[in-house]
Image (tube, grey):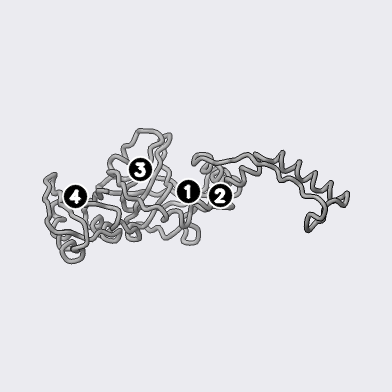
C-alpha cells in the first residue's frame, strides 16, 4: 500500500474515532460565534483550545478491508485504485515454482510466479460487481485466478493473451485472487539479483535460448548464471544482463528463469 493511500484512510478512521471531540469543539465554536466572542475569520477576543485527538493507525488488513468495502459498495475506491499504477509499483522478484502455486493447499498463502496469460474472461457477479477470470499457463499446467473489475486498457493496464507476466496471487479458501500483475518486460530486476539459473526442461530449446543469451545478454556488468539442462547444472564463467524483457523472451522460448536475490 502506498503512503498516500494509508494517510487518507488513517485520517478517515481518525475522524470517526474522534467524532465526539470534534462535535464538542464545533458546538463550543459556534456558540462563541453566536455570542460575538469569536469572528468567523479570526479569533478576535478568545482562542479556543483545540481538541486532543486519539492517535489512529490502520494495519494492512484493515486498510485492504476498507478499500474492498468501498469497491463492493459503489464499484470503485474513492481514494485508491488497485487497477492502475499500484500493479506495477512493487517489483516482484521472489519467484515461486509455478507447480507449487498450482498445487498450493496452504490457506492464506501469497505467491509470486511468472506465467503466460492463456485466456481472459470478464464476468459479472450475482450482485452486479464486475470481475475478471484469468487463466495462466506454463509447462502444461493451468492456474485460474480472479481480479476485481473488468480487464480494459482504460481501468487497469494492457493485459493480453500469449504475453508473459509476473503475478502475485493470494490463495484463500480454495480460490486464487490476483493482488498484482505486471508485464515481465516492464520490470527492471538488474539491481536486485545476485545470480541467475536458467532451467531448460526440453533440450530441444537449448540452441535457441543459448544463442539468444550469447547474442543479446552478455555483459561485463551483469550477473553470473548457469544452465540447468535435464537436472544437470552447467556453470558459466561469463556474466549476463537480466531484464524483464529478457526473462519474457527466455520464457517464451521454453526456458524457466530462476532469480537468486
> Contact, CB < 8 Å: mark 2 with mark 3?
no
Say whether disc 4 or disc 2 marks the residue closer to the N-terminus.
2
Is label 2 or label 3 in front? Answer: 2
What distance separates the C-alpha of mark 4 from that of mark 2? 44 Å
What distance separates the C-alpha of mark 3 from that of mark 1? 17 Å
Whole-percent x, y for residue 11 in the image: 61, 47
Against 88, residue 100 (above or below) is above
Q: Nearer the viewer, residue 118 or 195?
A: 195
Circle 3 crowding by C-alpha within 10 Å: few under 14, some 14–19, many from 20: many
> Contact, CB < 8 Å: mark 4 with mark 2?
no
Name the residue carrying label 1.
1
Name the residue carrying label 2.
7
Residue at 47% over, 57% down: 84
Residue at 61% over, 42% down: 13
Q: On the picture, is 117 further left or further right than 230?
A: right
Name the residue carrying label 3.
111
Name the residue carrying label 4.
199
Say whether disc 2 or disc 3 marks the residue closer to the N-terminus.
2
Is label 3 or label 1 in front? Answer: 1
SS class of the residue under badge 1? loop
Amino acid at each position: 500500500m502506498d503512503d498516500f493511500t494509508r494517510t487518507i484512510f488513517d485520517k478517515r478512521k481518525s475522524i470517526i474515532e474522534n467524532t465526539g471531540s470534534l462535535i464538542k469543539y464545533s458546538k463550543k465554536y459556534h456558540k462563541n460565534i453566536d455570542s460575538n466572542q469569536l469572528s468567523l475569520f479570526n479569533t478576535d477576543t478568545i482562542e479556543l483550545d483545540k481538541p486532543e485527538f486519539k492517535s489512529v493507525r490502520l494495519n494492512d488488513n484493515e486498510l485492504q478491508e476498507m478499500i474492498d468495502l468501498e469497491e463492493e459498495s459503489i464499484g470503485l475506491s474513492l481514494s485508491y485504485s488497485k487497477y492502475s499504477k499500484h500493479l506495477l509499483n512493487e517489483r516482484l522478484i521472489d519467484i515461486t515454482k509455478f507447480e507449487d502455486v498450482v498445487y498450493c493447499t496452504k490457506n492464506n498463502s501469497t505467491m509470486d510466479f511468472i506465467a503466460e496469460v492463456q485466456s481472459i474472461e470478464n464476468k459479472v457477479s450475482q450482485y452486479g460487481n464486475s470481475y475478471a477470470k484469468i487463466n495462466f499457463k506454463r509447462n502444461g499446467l493451468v492456474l485460474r485466478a480472479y481480479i476485481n473489475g473488468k480487464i480494459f486498457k482504460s481501468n487497469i493496464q494492457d493485459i493480453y493473451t500469449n504475453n508473459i507476466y509476473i503475478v502475485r496471487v493470494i490463495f484463500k479458501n480454495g480460490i486464487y485472487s490476483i493482488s498484482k500483475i505486471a508485464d515481465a518486460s516492464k520490470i527492471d530486476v538488474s539491481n536486485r539479483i545476485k545470480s541467475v539459473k536458467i532451467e531448460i526442461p526440453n533440450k530441444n530449446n537449448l540452441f535457441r535460448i543459448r544463442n539468444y543469451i550469447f547474442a543479446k545478454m552478455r555483459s561485463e556488468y551483469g550477473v553470473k548464471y548457469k544452465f540447468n539442462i535435464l537436472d544437470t547444472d552447467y556453470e558459466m564463467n561469463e556474466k549476463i544482463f537480466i531484464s524483464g524483457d529478457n526473462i519474457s523472451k527466455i520464457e517464451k522460448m521454453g526456458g524457466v528463469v530462476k532469480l537468486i536475490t
